[in-house]
């Protein structure tokens, strides 16, 4: 076994980012006599799985070859037939697997099938690197809820806007371009109504490469009192990407006529009750509904109160913090996370697995990535 072949499979898997949802990212490489004779990756939802792509690309007979694959091969009929049967039919003698598949339809069944048919199986090879491909899939397939990431840009002194609301731009163009790459990886994107009223965003994914096809995220607005302007860019660009406005029953009732106009314009309006502890929209039923619609991930770009709601209702798994090389100073400048009922340092929300990225010229922006531990905020 050689690490370079699994790392090649990992690199191939990453090419599917933004296109495989709600399926995982998977790459496969077939090696014989220390030469790659086939490789592939899961390119889009409904398309061939990585194993079948690799087998289809074979340049020579695969009998006695080794397949390196980042995720346990499936053994069930889905959009595509089982990959385990394709591996068997190709005559591959050894399969080296990175991640185990928690999907109940697989969950060890793929490995069991291969072993039962005389194929040697090596599991957990470069497991940590392979697992890092699919936190979204692993969370969604086990919880049936979207994987939620909070994202915000702030100054080096922790502010997201001046007292007058001005926030454009805290970060450099390279950082803002990176946000669009991030949006491509998430199936939906959410903001609060205050962000809509202040910034009038479109929330679409705009990549710098004009020849790259982008699957636009579903845009979601938390709007308890249905204040979204009909003239907002979100409503006016309804043909570019779906828009869901989430309100409360009382908000929908008070703005019944406006709801009808929004619906006629193609906007979907959903109603959910307020959370008893926070007084804001209850997020868990919303996430359940998104999960039922096979929306596997949600990028939250809301203001401080929206981020606080997700944290207080413990409905977030990831945090992206873009830090611009600027200072706004204290006073009434706005914070990235609103008030939380944390009475002591020992009860603070814990972050783990930090990653640090930076780019820029003289004034360097920094991106911090963290996993959010599951400790609750009461």
Image (cartoon, rainbow, N blue to C red):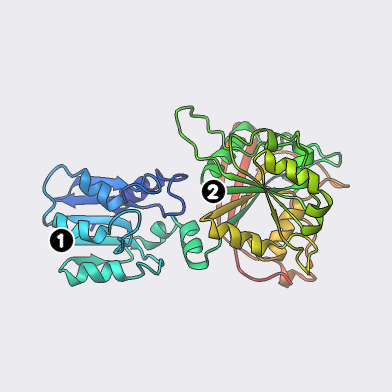
Query: Which numbered circle lies on residue 93?
Result: 1
Image coords of residue 86 (percent x, y): 21, 56
Name which quarter of the figure residue 270 lies in.
bottom right
Relative horizontal placement of residue 339, taking residue 19 as reference (left or right): right
| Residue 368 shows in the view | yes
| Residue 159 shows in the view | no
In depth, the one of 328 and 187 nearer the eye is 187
Relative horizontal placement of residue 4, taking residue 260 as reference (left or right): left
In depth, the one of 53 and 219 nearer the eye is 219
Image coords of residue 42 (percent x, y): 35, 48
Name which quarter of the figure residue 76 lies in.
bottom left
Q: Residue furthest right?
A: 331
Q: Residues within 10 Å of mark 1 (few under 14, many from 20)?
A: some
Q: Are marks 2 and 1 in contact (CB under 8 Å)?
A: no
Helix, strand or loop under label 1: loop
> Which of disc 1 and disc 2 is earlier in sequence?
1
Q: Residue at x 15, y 42 (%)?
A: 59
Frontmost of labels 2 and 1 is 2
Image coords of residue 215 (percent x, y): 50, 40
Q: Residues within 10 Å of mark 2 (few under 14, many from 20)?
A: many
In depth, the one of 183 and 319 nearer the eye is 183
Helix, strand or loop under label 2: loop
Name which quarter of the figure residue 153 lies in.
top right
Distance, label 2 to label 1, CA atoms, is 37 Å
Query: Which numbered circle lies on residue 186?
Result: 2
């Amino acid at each position: 076994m050689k690490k370079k072949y699994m790392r090649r499979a990992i690199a191939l898997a990453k090419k599917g980012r933004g296109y495989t949802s709600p399926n995982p990212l998977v790459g496969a490489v077939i090696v014989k006599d220390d030469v790659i004779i086939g490789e592939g990756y899961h390119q889009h939802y409904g398309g061939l799985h990585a194993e079948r792509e690799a087998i289809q690309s074979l340049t020579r007979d695969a009998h006695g070859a080794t397949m390196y694959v980042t995720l346990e091969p499936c053994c069930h009929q889905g959009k595509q037939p089982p990959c385990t049967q394709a591996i068997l039919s190709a005559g591959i003698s050894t399969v080296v697997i990175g991640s185990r598949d928690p999907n109940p339809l697989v969950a060890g069944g793929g490995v069991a099938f291969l072993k039962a048919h005389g194929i040697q199986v090596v599991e957990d090879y470069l497991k940590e690197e392979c697992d890092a491909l699919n936190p979204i899939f692993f969370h969604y397939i086990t919880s049936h809820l979207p994987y939620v990431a909070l994202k915000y840009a702030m100054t080096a002194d922790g502010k997201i806007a001046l007292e007058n609301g001005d926030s454009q731009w805290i970060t450099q163009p390279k950082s803002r371009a990176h946000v669009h790459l991030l949006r491509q990886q998430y199936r939906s994107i959410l903001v609060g109504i205050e962000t809509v009223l202040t910034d009038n965003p479109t929330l679409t994914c705009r990549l710098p490469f004009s020849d790259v096809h982008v699957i636009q995220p579903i845009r979601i607005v938390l709007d308890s009192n249905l204040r979204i302007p009909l003239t907002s860019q979100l409503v006016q660009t309804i043909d570019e990407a779906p828009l869901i406005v989430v309100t409360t029953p009382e908000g929908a009732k008070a703005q019944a006529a406006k709801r009808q106009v929004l619906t006629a314009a193609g906007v979907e309006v959903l109603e959910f009750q307020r959370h008893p502890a926070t007084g804001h929209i209850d997020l868990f039923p919303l996430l359940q509904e998104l999960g039922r619609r096979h929306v596997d991930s949600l990028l939250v770009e809301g203001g401080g109160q929206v981020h606080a709601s997700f944290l207080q209702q413990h409905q977030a798994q990831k945090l992206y913090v873009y830090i611009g090389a600027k200072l706004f100073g204290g006073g009434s400048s706005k914070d990235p996370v609103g008030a939380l009922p944390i009475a002591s340092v020992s009860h603070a929300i814990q972050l783990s697995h930090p990653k640090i990225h930076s780019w820029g010229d003289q004034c360097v922006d920094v991106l911090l990535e963290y996993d959010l531990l599951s400790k609750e905020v009461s």
